[in-house]
Every structure is written in C-alpha cells, then in structure tokens.
Image (spheres, helix red, strand yellow):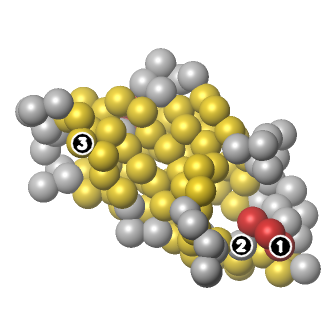
Amino acid sequence: QVQLVESGGGLVQAGGSLRLSCAAAGNFFSINAMGWYRQAPGLQRELVATITDDNRSNYADSVKGRFTISRDNAKNTVYLQMNSLKPEDTSVYYCNADIEIGLGYDKYWGQGTQVTVSS
C-alpha cells in the first residue's frame, strides 16, 4: 500500500514562512510528477505547484516568487517552501504524486495539512 505522509503545516503571521514536506511510503517502483494543491472552505481544490522527476517546476500565478517546490528523489519526498505568506494562502494543503506500482502510474493524495496565516 502506498501512502503520502505530509508534515509542516501550522499557524504563522502574515509575512512569515513555512515549509511543507510530503514523503511517499510503501512498495512502488517509481514516482513521476509530484505536486502541491490547496483547498479553502467552500472553494475548489487548486494547483499550487508541480515538479517533474527531472526537476521542471510549474507554479500558480498567485504563488510565483513566494513559494518554491523541490524534491529529493532519494527520499521520495517533495517540499514546498512558502515565504511571504499572506492571509489568502490560508488553506488545507495536499500533496500529490504519480506513482507506479506495476501497471502504469496512479495518482495518490496526502491527507492534507492545515496552513493558517493570520493578518
């Protein structure tokens, strides 16, 4: 069974920083793209950032220049460094990964971690 285990959320003041981590655990062959999404109450889940297995990244316009996505393939982990946080960044953040367990890639989601930015 494959799991994505997230950590690093919390409460921070506007202008502060947080670093999220998400590690893939279980039995699998490889991981392709990884990413972070977020969902605020009453809103749809939206893409924050993605990164390919060869480190090509993509960001939502709302976080460009403030957030940085990275990954450590040896640890099967993806990170999201969030700087200059704003109250509108408050949301539940979910990691996502395309993981191969034997019959092509399937999409997996983490359990979500709350990020709250106070003004």
The crowd level at tag 3 (other Cα within 10 Å; few <14, some 14-19, many 20+) is few
In the image: residue 103, left or right of residue 69:
left
In the image: residue 27, left or right of residue 91:
left
Q: Is residue 42 above or below residue 51?
A: below
Q: Secondary structure at mark 1?
A: helix
Q: Three-letter amino acid code at disc 3?
A: Asp
Label 2, on which residue?
A: 90
Q: CA distance from mark 2 to mark 3?
A: 28 Å
- For the residues labelled 1 and 2, say whether their Cβ atoms are less than 8 Å apart: yes
Q: Is residue 66 above or below residue 73?
A: below
Which of the labelled discs sits on residue 87, or is there none?
1
Which of the labelled discs sits on residue 106, or is there none?
3
Which of discs 2 and 3 lies nearer the camera? The answer is 3
Which residue is pictured at 24% across the width and 42% down the height?
Answer: 106
Q: Three-letter amino acid code at disc 2?
A: Thr
Q: Three-letter amino acid code at disc 1?
A: Pro
